[in-house]
Amino acid sequence: MNRHDDFDRTLAAWFESEALAPAPAEGLERILDGTRRRRPRPSWLAAAGSRWVGDAPTTGPTTGLRSLPRLDVRWSTALVVLLVVAALVGGAILIAARLRQPTPLPTGRLGHLAYAVDGDLYLADWDGANPVKVVDGVPDGGPLCQDVEGEGRMWSPDGQYLAYRSGCRGSVELVDPEGHSVASFPGQGWLVSWSPDSRRIATWVDLGRTVGIYGVDGVRQALLTVPPGCPAPGDFDPVWSPDGSSVVIVPCEVPVDGSTPRHLGPDDPRSHFQWAYAPDGARVAYVAGGSLFVAARDGSQHRVLISGGLEFGPRWSPTGDRIAFTVRTAPDRFDLRVVDVASGQVTQLADVRGVGASFLVGFSPEGDRILYWAGVDDVPSLWSVNTDGSHAQVLVTGAGWGDWQWLPAGS
């Protein structure tokens, strides 16, 4: 034995006396099992301020940049909060910006086609397909008694009701899209004159003398006296102002609230036989001397769009950028055309030949098609054509009156 052996024995004894007892096997297994079940965190969370075991924050002057010890908030949580706040602020700014933009014109979509044939009322798809009779007119009315008749628009502006004139009853009839009666009240004339809010109808009660304002419930809300000299000679029905505060009977304006009517001066566009407000109510188109004019609502800033030859119109597009009209090019020929209000460019849409007449009903809600009536050899028909002149087609043969339903967008 040498001194190295003594040293080895001394060191071995010291290791044996200082060694710690090993952990029980069951405790170690429990710890390992818990570790296995713990869901690992994504690596991007193991950064400044993380609470990973064995990753104690480093002390020093940069500690404040890596963690938030006072608030006990991880940098990842703070980042999420900041992103949410930024999104809310950005959304508020975007909404505010949209609220400050001008409100666009109402949009809609094309619904059913309503039309009258032989005194009965039908509903069909917009192109005339799948027709269904919803109002059976008075039987055996004869040629002098058409139970469903009228002119102009048939559907209310909101597309909820149909109105027509009963030639057999001498009344205005309101029905829903299924043909169920909603209201009935006395009325004379030709045009079915809906108010802009779809809540009222104006009609002659005593032709040429008094106008009745009726609600959709059939209750008369006002009886207006028309001043002497109105209407002018011809078939003039009351036409609503854009705000619904008055009706115009050429050449007079009669307030609905019963205040004093007034005669329209010769410079007022509404003193002419054919005129129409633009959808925004700020402009008016009218026909004078066979020419088409457009002007501000008060008649100022007027200019000629089409010189001479106009037979029927005008009809504004839903966005107010185009006007449709018809011209007579020969005793037996009519042209349907559209003019761009800004540029004056004219597009010919259809050429109707034959003895009879041709006039416009109006644009579709999208402004891409036009509905018009054409009488060829005394046979009336409803037609449709694209506003670029393509796809002219007969929708219903034998129909002398019809109207497309406008449905609000999203309905």
Image: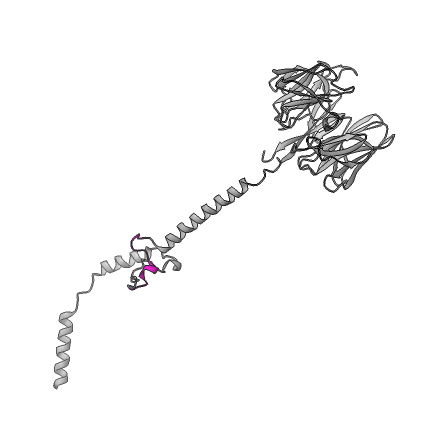
- Judge from the rendering whether residue 99 lies leftward or rightward of residue 24; answer left or right: right
Quarter-wise, where is residue 156 in the image?
top right
Residue in view at x 23 percent, y 58 percent: 27
The type of colouring in the image is: one colour
Q: Nearer the viewer, residue 35 or 398?
A: 398
Image coords of residue 272 (percent x, y): 76, 26
Residue in view at x 75 percent, y 27 percent: 274
- Viewport quadrant of the C terminus: top right
- Judge from the rendering whether residue 399 lies leftward or rightward of residue 215; answer left or right: right
- Viewport quadrant of the N terminus: bottom left
Range of magenta residues: 60-72
Image coords of residue 370 (percent x, y): 73, 34
Image coords of residue 145 (percent x, y): 76, 15
Q: Nearer the viewer, residue 231 or 235?
A: 231
Q: Nearer the viewer, residue 266 or 331?
A: 266
Quarter-wise, where is residue 340 in the image?
top right
Image: 340 above or below 163 = below
The secondary structure making up most of the magenta span is loop
**Total numbered circles:** 0
Residue 189 painted magenta: no
Quarter-wise, where is residue 338 in the image?
top right
User: Can you name the residue that lies furthest to the right here?
Assistant: 331
Residue 67 painted magenta: yes
**Does any portion of residue 277 appear in the rendered image?**
yes
**Does any portion of residue 136 appear in the rendered image?**
no
